[in-house]
Amino acid sequence: MTRPEAVPAGKPIPPDFPPVVYLPCVEQVSDASQARIAMRETRDGRVALLAYSALDRLQHCCGTNQPWLVMPTVGLDELQRVRPFSLLLLDVFIPEENRQEAAS
């Protein structure tokens, strides 16, 4: 697995960033338009969006029960507009004790 990458908000996404990303969601939904993206607060109070370059990485890093949705990377700009975040973190491992149980 590659080293996690961080992109500060407002900075361009690197050209070698995956064309699609898998985003953890708060709960499982049948209609993707109803999905709520799970964001995390960093120790210094910033809001981080966790993104994963492949489904197997999301499941390894967040757990197999983690709800998710797939989004074209170009859609992250719109997500930033409607739900601002300070950091975009790629392929970050979440220790089991820090994983959030998905709401049903």
Image (cartoon, grey):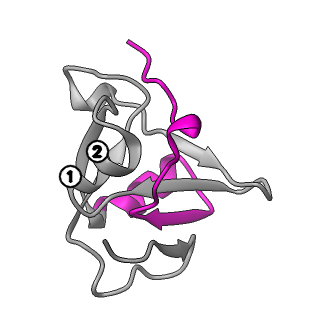
Which quadrant holds the N terminus? bottom left
Q: Nearer the viewer, residue 101 or 16?
A: 101
Q: Residue furthest right?
A: 44
Residue 13 appears at what percent x and percent y? 40, 79
Q: Nearer the viewer, residue 48 or 54?
A: 54
Q: Is residue 53 above or below residue 45?
A: below
Residue that appears at 80% across and 59% down: 44
Q: Which residues are magenta?
A: 75-104
Q: Kindly identify the residue that appears in the image at 69 percent across and 54 percent down.
A: 42
- Position above or below: 70 against 19: above
Looking at the picture, which amino acid does disc 1 mark?
A: Asp
In which quadrant of the rendered image does the C terminus lie? top left
Residue 101 shown in magenta:
yes
The x and y percentages for residue 55 are: 20, 51
Against 34, residue 8 (above or below) is below
Q: Residues within 10 Å of mark 2 (few under 14, many from 20)?
A: some
Q: Is residue 40 left or right of residue 51?
A: right
What is the residue that sits farthest to the front in this orientation?
Answer: 96
Q: Which residue is mark 1?
A: 56
Q: Determine whether, in the image, residue 57 is placed left or right of residue 30.
A: right
Give the side of residue 55 with respect to residue 100, left or right.
left
Pointer 2: what residue? 59
